[in-house]
Structures are given as structure tokens and as C-alpha cells.
Amino acid sequence: MRNPEGARIPPGRRIALDAMGGDDAPVVPVAAARRAAAIHGLDVVLVGDPAAMHAAGLPAEGSGVAIAPAADVIGMDEEAALAVRARPEASIRVAIGLLAAGRADAVVSAGSTGATMAAALLGVGRVRGIRRPVLAAVLPFIAQAGTAAGAGGPEGARFGAVLVDAGASSDVQPEALVAYARMGIAYARVLGVDAPRVGLLNVGGERGKGNELARAAYGLLSELVEFVGNVEPRAVLTGAVDVVATDGFTGNVFLKTVEAVGARAFGIQANRAAPVGGPGAAVLLGVAGPVLVAHGAADADELVAALLMADRVATSGMVDRLGAVL
Amino acid sequence: MRNPEGARIPPGRRIALDAMGGDDAPVVPVAAARRAAAIHGLDVVLVGDPAAMHAAGLPAEGSGVAIAPAADVIGMDEEAALAVRARPEASIRVAIGLLAAGRADAVVSAGSTGATMAAALLGVGRVRGIRRPVLAAVLPFIAQAGTAAGAGGPEGARFGAVLVDAGASSDVQPEALVAYARMGIAYARVLGVDAPRVGLLNVGGERGKGNELARAAYGLLSELVEFVGNVEPRAVLTGAVDVVATDGFTGNVFLKTVEAVGARAFGIQANRAAPVGGPGAAVLLGVAGPVLVAHGAADADELVAALLMADRVATSGMVDRLGAVL
């Protein structure tokens, strides 16, 4: 079965999109759902306020876009864990509920990361063996002078480093970074990297550099064959590794700095406008189902990229395999 | 007394420049010393191997450039504390010795930051009341679209935020960030900011965000009238504050990320090519004398800026005043 543009429609796979999440919701999510269905043949369920979605240009039945009503919304500045527990009608709760019930195969939201994480933990739980899920963003490689695509590799196979943790947990033990690295390796494989190399984000290349966490993590990470040592920010951004392990505080500062400086330089939004083939969103690794968080300022094309990535993660079986690698 | 270009020669103030520090030493330091003397009337003492300095184009006597011989050099990759203790003839040890003996009023090195810190602690010690000196770099503001100089303020008065700690101490207690903020305020005043605003580097604006260190430091920093709250990387780089307090691990990752992304975008080298009037180097705040560290890749113009900044710090009496604010 093919849609008018000729893209293959996947056999029954369906992505739930939080229509109420993001700076310009539901306009941007509705536009993204239309485009993902029309151009890429994705089956998208928009979750939110039906009246608002209709006003935002919801397409007619049979377009590949369905809706699931949700009467409530959790805002960006609310205390996520409390709000998620208290409000079962919130769009992100309903979207995760579709995933839990097997009525969707993945969830995408451009709303609050904390609320999405809390709703996912409440609704679908964790992969067995994973203590705490992690936020995995992809940092684009900054091309070396004179080259177009960073450190090399086949076109489309390497477009950036997987940053774990990009902001889920600020205070962690060194052991957590090993789990992050393992999850990051699994995700990098989904992104097309055959033999991912793992680095530890640090302030110097030599062993012994860094804070207590980094020094302790270095020893533990050394047991992974994929581990290549410490990496400084420049090395990460020029393609020295495929997976970067760090705590969520340092990782989030790193990500936000790349975004702040890069946005003016290259149109980089590490978590947003990834190159062709790249993810349009960060993934909650370790949650027992594909759940992706797009940037709050994502435009419709970036949300389409996020929907395509969600489809790719759902198809890959990565979530099932995460339990096996940990 | 004026030099041929008409610049005022300061009354007897003298800057010791480590001629052996930096990627292209002693060529770049010798060129910088010549230029600083000829154009700005600075009195510079080049410290290093006389034969190598002569080969690099040392000017004739009476040019405002003197030399102090040093037979040894500490490399960038050596274990700083050990090397500094073991090698009294190293150029950075001799340069700091001039400061300690009152034969120089400030020291500049483009060599190892760790070695410079260790030599300074050994040779001149700390300001009374300061437990551990801090590395203060200046992060340039990234101009908002349509403006030329960031968040405003008189030309030359505000050109970037003082980052403390930029990399001296990776593991610290929350109380340290208050001391860093106080030192940063004193330095910002030297840089021409009348009423410095202090922010805490964090992953969100609201109180309660961040890791344990940040959450604890927030409460302590709140007792400073200059404290305006948490700041995310974008806010720092667009001029929301004049002083940014953080631990040296996070600060160094932040600084290096700005450099890595910014170098390709704006020619930004946070620690190097500052705007006109800005420092050309990071300052070791809390050391009992003006000691500045330039980027290892600094060119001669950047080292001249560092020498001028060293002169400004020496003239300001900041070091003496630091003891009073802590």
C-alpha cells in the first residue's frame, strides 16, 4: 500500500504525537502530522484538544492522521512529577497511555522533557535492568575546514555523537555512566553506526583528568571495548567519538552551549534541526517503549524528522534489545 | 616619558613574560614583548633561554624589553605540581620569582595553566582569606541580532562575562562558589563594570534546578546583593550577567565548548581574542600577585592584550582588595 507520493506505508505502525506540546502547539504538531502522513506515509495520532486541533487545520478522515482527545495540558514550567501524577487527562499522559495499551508504537512530544519522562515512567515503566532512563540527544559534528560532513564515514551513517545523559539526571554515581554508554551504543547502532566509539566528556585527554565522577567513571568505562578515553568538547564536535558519556548536568550545559553558540553560526540546534537522516528529537533511553522529546521551538519539519526517528526506533527493536545489553 | 608612538610609559611597572610558554615559543612571546614595548610603552621582562630568545629576534637593549635567563621549561603535558617543585630553573618558576622579589609587578604565561598555578602558589602564595585561587576567564557576549555589542552598556565597559571557575578546581563545596563570585565581582570592576550582576551557571532558570552543588550554592549566593539567580548558557552569552559562578569542571567544559563552536563562527576564542579592551588571558584570582594565563595558541597580538591586561590588573590594586572582600 502506498500513499499518493509513493512512500511505503508501514504495516500498521502508528506514532502518537502530543498535539499540545511545544511553543506553537497545536499548530505546529498538526502541520507536522499532515506532512508526515502525506509525504512519508506515517500513521500519526494527534493527542490533544479536538476543537483546538480542528482550528489548527486538522485534515479530513482517511488522511493518515487520527486524533485522540485529551482535555488537559501540562505546561513547561510546572513541577513535572506532581503534575503528571495529578492529571491523567493531560495530553502527554493520554499519548503514553496509547503506547502502554499497544494502540501506538511510539510517542513524540515537544512539551516538557520532565513531564514526558515522568509520564513515560508512570505509564510504560523502565526496561528491565535499567535503574534510571537517560536522555540521549545527538550533537551534530562540526565539519572540519574543507570537508562537508565531519570526520568522515559513509554519507548518512555518521552525523553526530550521541550525548548521554543530555539532561535527565543531574547527580549520579560513576556506574551510571557505564549504563549510559551501553544505552548510547545501542542507539548509535540504530542511527547506522556499525562500531560505535565511546568517549567520556572531560576537560583533558589524559587519564586522571576531571572531577571525582569523571575519574571514577574512567576506570569503569575502560572495561568496555568501545571506550576510547576522555574527549574534550572540540573532539566531540569534530567526530572523535560516536557516543559521549557524562552526567546530566554537565551534558545539559554542554548541549545548551552548543545550541546557544551554534544557532548563530550554523543554524545548529543540536536537539532540533539535525542533518538529513538525523534524529529530530532526543530519545528517552531505558523507558520501556519508544518515547522521543523534540525541542519546544521545533518547527513542523523538525517534528516530521522526530516522527520519522520515532518510527525508526520503533522498527529497530532497540527498546527490547536494551534489556539484553545491560 | 613617552615612547616614539606617544604612549605613556608607566612609572617603573614591569611585566614578566614566560618566553618559553605557548605553542610557538619563544617566537610569539618575543614578538609580543617587542610590540608591547614599542606600541604601548610597556616594560617587559622576557624569561627563558637567552640563546633561543635571541634567535627569535630579541630587540636591542634600551627597547623596553629586558631578559631574565631561565635554563628549563615545563611542558604542557607534565604533572604540574611535581614538575614545578622539582625544577626551580623552569621559566615559569623564574618569572614568578621576579614577582615574589618585587622585580616584576605581574606575570603572563601562555604555558601550562596547572604549572602556572602551582608556581604561583609556591612562589607568592594566596591572598589572605582565600582557600584556593580560581581561574577567571572572560566569555565574550554574542551580539543579539541587529546589535553590535551584546546586551548594551557603554562601549568598552561590558564585553563579556567573567567565568569563575574556568578550570582550576574540579571538585568544590558550595561555599567555594560564593568566594568565586566575590572574586569575580572584584575582577569585573577592574574590567570596568560598575555594578556587576552575578549568575549561577545552571540548566534552568528556576530555583531548585541543577545538581546538588548548584542547588546548595543557590541558597548561599542569595546572600549576595549582586546575585540575580540561575543563568543558562544562552543567557550568559547574551549578556544577562557580568559574573558567572560554577565549579571548575563545568566551567571548563562550558569555556571549551564556546571556544570549539565559536571559533568557527565568530573567531571567538573566549580565552584569547577578546574584543578591544578585553583581557587577552585568564587571571588566577586569589594568588597574591597578578598572574595571567594566555591561551597556548595565542598569537602575538593576543599576548600583547594579555600584557596590557596584566598591567591593568597590577595598576588596579585588585589583588590587595581581594583580601578585603573575602
Image: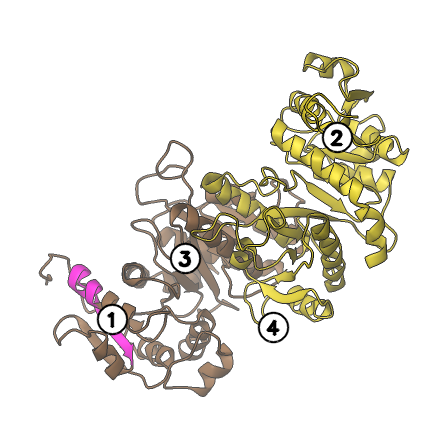
Chain colours: A yellow, B brown
Q: Amino acid at mark 2?
A: Arg
Mark 1 and mark 3 in contact? Answer it, CB < 8 Å.
no
Q: Position of residue B298 (x, y in %)?
A: 35, 62
Is disc 1 surrounded by few (<14), some (14 to 19) or many (20+) residues within 10 Å? Answer: many
Dot 3 falls on which chain? B
Dot 2 falls on which chain? A
Q: Which residues are magenta?
A: B34-48
Q: Nearer the viewer, residue B284 or A312?
A: A312
Q: CA distance from mark 2 to mark 4?
A: 51 Å
Mark 4 and mark 3 in contact? Answer it, CB < 8 Å.
no
Q: Amino acid at mark 1?
A: Val
Q: Amino acid at mark 4?
A: Gly
What residue is rendered at 58% in x and 41% in y?
Answer: A275
Mark 2 and mark 1 in contact? Answer it, CB < 8 Å.
no
- Residue B219 shows up from this direction: no
Which mark is first along the chain, 4 or 2? Answer: 2
Q: Position of residue A57 (x, y in %)?
A: 68, 14
Residue that mark 4 sits on: A208
User: Looking at the image, is B297 positioned above or below residue B60?
Assistant: above
Residue that mark 1 sits on: B30
Q: CA distance from mark 4 to mark 3?
A: 24 Å
Q: CA distance from mark 2 to mark 1?
A: 67 Å
Q: CA distance from mark 3 to mark 2?
A: 52 Å
Residue that mark 3 sits on: B271
Mark 1 and mark 4 in contact? Answer it, CB < 8 Å.
no
Residue that mark 2 sits on: A8
Which mark is first along the chain, 3 or 1? Answer: 1
Is disc 2 surrounded by few (<14), some (14 to 19) or many (20+) residues within 10 Å? Answer: some
B188 sits to left or right of A174: left
A129 sits to left or right of B268: right
